[in-house]
Image (cartoon, rainbow, N blue to C red):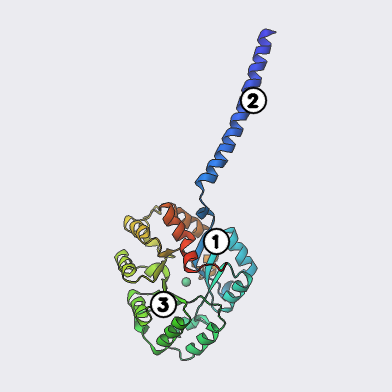
Amino acid sequence: MYVYTKSLINNLFVNFFFKFSITFVAIFSFLLFLYITPSWANKLNDGHIHYNDDVWDDLSPDQVISYLTENEINRAIVFGTPTAGTEKLYKLSPQRVIPFLMPYRVFRDRHTWHSDPTMPDYVKQQLSTGIYKGFGEFHLFKEHKDTTVIRQLMQMVADHKIMLSAHADVETIEALIEMQPEVSVIWAHCGMDHPVEDVRRMLAQYPKLFCELSFRYNMFDKQGKLLTQWKTLLEEYSKRFILGMDTYIPRRWANLPENVDFARQWLSQLQPETRKLIGGGNIDRMFPLKK
Ligand SMILES: [Zn+2]
């Protein structure tokens, strides 16, 4: 009897202790999760979202906003060809959509817009809506960097005190900044394949230049680790880089979850303050929300 009772007590004790331990571990893990998961991890801001007409049938404006929410993208710079897509998203979610005016009414404008005499009137009329916070994304290379149309458009951008998003080479970025030094420029894809030394020199030389990082896959080694030179640059100029998912074709919308995961993976290689800024803080600083 004594033995039986003792073993029962033992069992009860072991059982209680076991359950208590499990509960304790669960609570402790949850608290640890809350502690080590900083707010940046749940919210990103994106500097390169396209909402072009080739996805309108599959992704309504409502679905775009839900999809961004699912992927924990809070605010986004949005471009559209045509720009009606951007307007629809902005009307739906003015707190989250930062509308930029892409100068392409149809896709083929991409090749001619810089010299198209109808462009200044079109841009003037669009900017008069007052919703746009930027002009771009546009593609412009050194052969066409200084046309009459470009000068007129740059004057309008300066008059409206809005930013640029330029997919361009070093020479073109320099020409645009020299044309209108007060205009802040987001360098789309951070020059794409210009060497890291060029990016460093540009950031040092032009304090109003920001770098958007979509398609900069050459920042990483084969394992997705940031190369030392890039890591150093991101830390040093942490206030000048922004994320971008670049949904320029339907496939990039489909791949958005993987691209967001990859961004979180490489952001986690940076100092906490840097990852907060590049992950979203910089866009909040560049485009403060109205209180
Ligand atoms: Zn783009």
Which circle, 2 or 3, is nearer the viewer?
Answer: 3
Query: Which amino acid lies under the numbered mark 2 shown in the image of this protein?
Result: Phe
Q: Check disc 3 and give the amino acid type.
A: Val
Residue 217 occupies which quadrant of the picture?
A: bottom left
Find residue 117 and report its horizontal and vertical position in percent. Answer: 46, 91
**Residue 14 in sight here:** yes
Element type at marker 3?
A: loop
Question: Which residue does the numbered mark 1 point to in the structure image?
Answer: 73
Residue 83 lies, with reference to residue 46, above or below; the image says below
Q: Is residue 264 found left or right of 65 in the rendered image? A: left
Q: Secondary structure at mark 1?
A: strand
Camera sees residue 266:
no
Dot 3 or dot 1: first in sequence order is 1
To which residue does mark 3 refer? Answer: 183
| Mark 3 or 1: the one toward you | 3
Q: Amino acid at mark 1?
A: Ile
Instruction: From this view, report whether residue 202 is shown above or below residue 281.
Output: below
The residue that label 2 is drawn on is 16
